[in-house]
């Protein structure tokens, strides 16, 4: 019995040629869209209301109009339509702008941060400054006290009538006045330091209660809703397949 030999070579080549020709014909009906939208790594977009995609450098799309809606965190949506032509390239260049709501939130956040810092650090700085003043005042008070003791000791140990009269009339009263002045300064500085310390505690407690502004990205909610279609069971997420060019 003779074996039959099946010659698939020409037929396989013909089939491959037909598939290749069909693929080339299909690609000939596509155009390229290059995505140059900033901020690049954060930008997402919805293609033709059905396909949500992340950062993609380029797409091959069938000829005809295509709608793209771009979004990035804290930015306004950019809704645009491109007319794709077979074999041609289109570049989409855009810098997405921050929403007015987000800019207002940043200002409110800066105000809240400034208020917290002021409540905490202004009285704290005053406490440190008054504390340094109190320390210096204490040193001057101790110095004035020692000078008065020395003047009193000299007054009681001298035998010269002239010196005794001068110390009694000038030296001792001046030393006592200087000691009183330094005592007044010391009392004032310690009082102010204590007041500032209490204000610091109060400021930290107040700062802890300052409300930090909250922000809701409404544009994100709008963007996420572009590919969400409600049905009888509550919803359906529409997805699709697009060929990105790497």
Image (cartoon, rainbow, N blue to C red):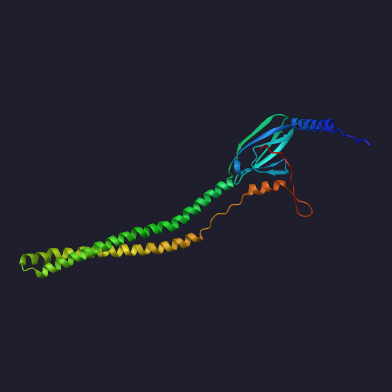
Q: Is residue 156 above or below residue 212?
A: below
Quadrant of the drawing holding the N terminus: top right
Residue 192 screen position, x and y as percent: 34, 62
Q: Is residue 226 left or right of residue 102?
A: right
The residue lying at 37 percent from left, 58 percent from top is 126
Q: Residue furthest front?
A: 1
Which image quadrant for residue 134?
A: bottom left
The residue lying at 40 percent from left, 64 percent from top is 198
Residue 26 screen position, x and y as percent: 77, 32
The residue lying at 70 percent from left, 48 percent from top is 225
Q: Nearer the viewer, residue 94 or 114?
A: 94
Quadrant of the drawing holding the C terminus: top right
Residue 70 screen position, x and y as percent: 65, 41
The residue lying at 43 percent from left, 63 percent from top is 201
Residue 157 screen position, x and y as percent: 9, 69
Q: Is residue 246 left or right of residue 18?
A: left
Q: Nearer the viewer, residue 31 or 107?
A: 31
Q: Is residue 138 left or right of residue 36?
A: left
């Amino acid at each position: 019995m003779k074996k039959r030999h099946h010659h698939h070579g020409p037929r396989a080549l013909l089939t491959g040629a037909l598939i290749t020709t069909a693929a080339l014909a299909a690609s000939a009906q596509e155009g390229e869209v290059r995505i140059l939208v900033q901020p690049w790594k954060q930008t997402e977009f919805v293609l033709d209301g059905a396909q949500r995609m992340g950062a993609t450098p380029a797409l091959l799309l069938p000829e005809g109009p295509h709608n793209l809606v771009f979004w990035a965190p804290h930015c306004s949506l950019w809704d645009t339509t491109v007319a794709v032509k077979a074999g041609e390239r289109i570049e989409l260049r855009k810098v997405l702008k921050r929403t007015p709501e987000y800019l207002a939130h940043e200002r409110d956040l800066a105000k809240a941060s400034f208020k917290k810092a002021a409540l905490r650090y202004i009285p704290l700085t005053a406490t440190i400054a008054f504390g340094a003043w109190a320390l210096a005042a204490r040193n001057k008070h101790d110095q004035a006290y020692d000078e008065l003791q020395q003047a009193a000791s000299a007054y009681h140990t001298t035998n010269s009538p002239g010196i005794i009269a001068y110390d009694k009339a000038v030296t001792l009263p001046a030393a006592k006045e200087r000691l009183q002045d330094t005592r007044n300064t010391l009392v004032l500085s310690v009082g102010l330091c204590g007041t500032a310390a209490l204000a610091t505690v109060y400021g930290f407690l107040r700062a802890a209660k300052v409300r930090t502004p909250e922000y809701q990205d409404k544009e994100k909610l709008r963007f996420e809703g572009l590919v969400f279609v409600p049905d009888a069971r509550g919803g359906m997420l529409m997805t699709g397949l697009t060929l990105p060019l790497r």
